[in-house]
Amino acid sequence: MELESLILNPAAQGTGARKKKSENTRIASCGSRSPKYNSKPRLEGERKGTGFYLPIASSDSLELDENSNSISYQEGEVDIDDHESYRHRNSDSEEEDDHHDPQHLQHFLPSTPATIKSTLTHFLSVILNSILPSNEMATVPSYTQGEAETTSKDKNAIYSDGDIASADSDAVKLAEMGYTQDLERNFSKWSLLGVSFALTNSWFGISASLVTGINSGGPIVTVYGIILIALINGCVGISLAELVSAMPNSGGQYYWVSVLAPQRHSKFLSYLTGAVGYAGSIFTCASVALAIGSALMGMIQMNHPDLVIERWMVFIAYQVFNLFAWFFNCYGKTLPKIGSFFLYVSLTSFIVITITVLATSSPKQNAKFVFANFVNNTGWESNAIAFIVGLINPNWSFACLDSATHLAEEVPRPESNIPFAIMGTVAIGFVTAFLYSIAMFFSMTNLDELVNTATLVPILELYRQATGSKPAAIFLEFLICFTGLGCQIACHTWQARLCWSFARDRGLPGSRYWSQVHPTMGIPFYAHTMSCIVVALLGLLYIGSTTAFNSMVTACIVLLYISYAIPVILLLMKGRGNIKHGPFWAGKPGLVANLVLLFWTGFTLIMYSFPYTKPVKSGTMNYVSAVYGVVFILTIGYWFARGNRTFRGGRERAAEAEQMVKEVASHAHVN
């Protein structure tokens, strides 16, 4: 019997006699351990916004209101809408092998909204618990779906693992995959597009990483590179959109792999994909923070010409922007508005900068300079290698197209809204980046000054040349930084969801903490904070090498491509016609898109590992190969140490969900 029919058609469970109120039954739930329920009483006739929740305890206690399309639970004095008085224990549930011992950890839900300060205290306790032996663990609140006791103000509300199942259509589909609805679906189609484009932000990426392209090809590699990379990433977008439309899940790539891979290899390949994708998101956050930090120091240097920018200065600016992104992501309900806001900020800044630079620059460069001028300051004798190295600039500008897929559980109708966000991001990115780059190169006056600028930010020097004014250039660069802040916030939203979803399948050390959803913030707070700490530590790489930014950018690009390529390979092996596709399906062009993605992944894995300049020195070496090595050593090491025993992929979760449904159906039939 389908899970949807059990949830939406309670009559299918039988019409036997009522069970006694004291009888505990198995709960139809499979998935993560963080509940999401309404704390507000529902008005008469009001429909719950993110779903209607159904504890399956007795077949006769379930009533479907056809008018409000909601389900109520009535058994004696129990009222599901008044969860403070709802008390239910699941005596049959067993703690999973990586879950904490209740003798050491107390579970509670604060009766009043927790402040960030108190939550940080909790986070420090989590870190101690991860370090200390199990018999020395400190007390820490655990916001999971296990036994959850309130504070001393109200200890009467206790929720057992799996009490609540969302019965709206999106949550039903999620439940069929083996997951519960833990996050509110508060993103609209447009706010999702806002977050997706705020992260990719192609024209901002061209500005921020111009230092890479300006030496490796000059204007020609940027202008034509944007066209080439936009076409390639259009294929990437189609491939991702097809998969997420068929299987919308916050796990994204690693969930698709778990479903598509042969059963024998499903678990390992899913784990590998999740680990590589998460590493890619971390390096993306680091590269964006470093780009904005460098821009900030460039503005300061332009205003104080005697200042010599040191690496530690950029490192501090890097940490400041990382902290800002952490702070803004602590307020889950505002994230959709922030995403929409920065979409408008990005487009407005693009228009203001482009018009200002074109209007004030004189004289203009000729068309030959923009469309036929090749610059090779890399030391490579081969212009082809210089061109390929320069493609890192536009390639980074179209990276992270999977970001929207990891918000699949926070948007309604993800099977259609996420493909819209992905393809919309590629389209807007191409138009803005192409027009912006042409406008900038027509407006520059001296290419050598851009390459050797004391600010270390070529686009800032370009603004000064175009406007003839340092204050005007600093103002335009401020717009870049503000746009970049939105990019950084969106980046942390993305990596936090990826970390959380991977942790709820126990793919990370300390997954029992990172998989929790904060009860008052409504975000995976611990996963977000832990990831920000890792990003902060990555900033140390810049202290050791001036090419750290290039290595971070390259790692971000290639690691994400690898995480895209694995599910696409499995899709082709399984056969594109052998899966149940969603509303977005490209047919034969989709096959071409898949093949382009696979070719480009292999190409970038090899070619983007080349040194940026010759002769090669320790301070200018491309260390991305070392980054790959560290990522894969840590990934494989944890797999053999523990991951192969604890990790659960989507295939296992779906099997558990199916088995649970059968048990509920069998129990209802007996009664």
Image: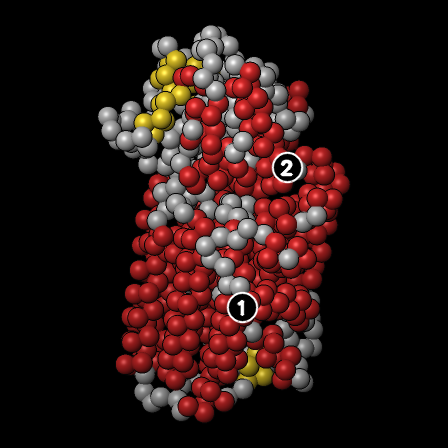
* Residue labelled with disc 2: 652
Label placed on residue 563: none
Q: Looking at the picture, how far across and down is residue 540, in whole percent?
A: 59, 53
Secondary structure beneath dot 1 equals: helix
Q: Mark 2 falls on what kind of element? A: helix
**Which residue is rendered at x = 62% and y = 67% of the image?**
595
| Residue drawn where x is 24% and y is 26% of the image | 44
Q: What residue type is labelled 2?
A: Glu
Residue 245 drawn above or below residue 91: below
> How far apart in space, not on screen, are marks 1 and 2 (Cα)?
32 Å
**Which image quarter is the N terminus in?**
top right
Front in this rendered view, residue 107 or 292 = 107
Q: Is the residue under label 2 in contact with that under label 1 (CB below 8 Å)?
A: no
* Residue at x-position 31% and y-position 60%: 344
Identify the residue under disc 1.
589
Residue 14: % across, % down = 48, 20
Q: Which of marks 1 and 2 is nearer the N terminus?
A: 1
Spot occupied by residue 203 in the image (x, y as percentages of width and height): 42, 69
Which of the two residues, 55 or 369, is positioned nearer the viewer here?
A: 55
Amino acid bearing label 1? Pro
Q: In this view, does 40 lie above or below 480?
A: above
Residue 90 appears anywhere in the view: no
Residue 323, percent from left and from top: 45, 47
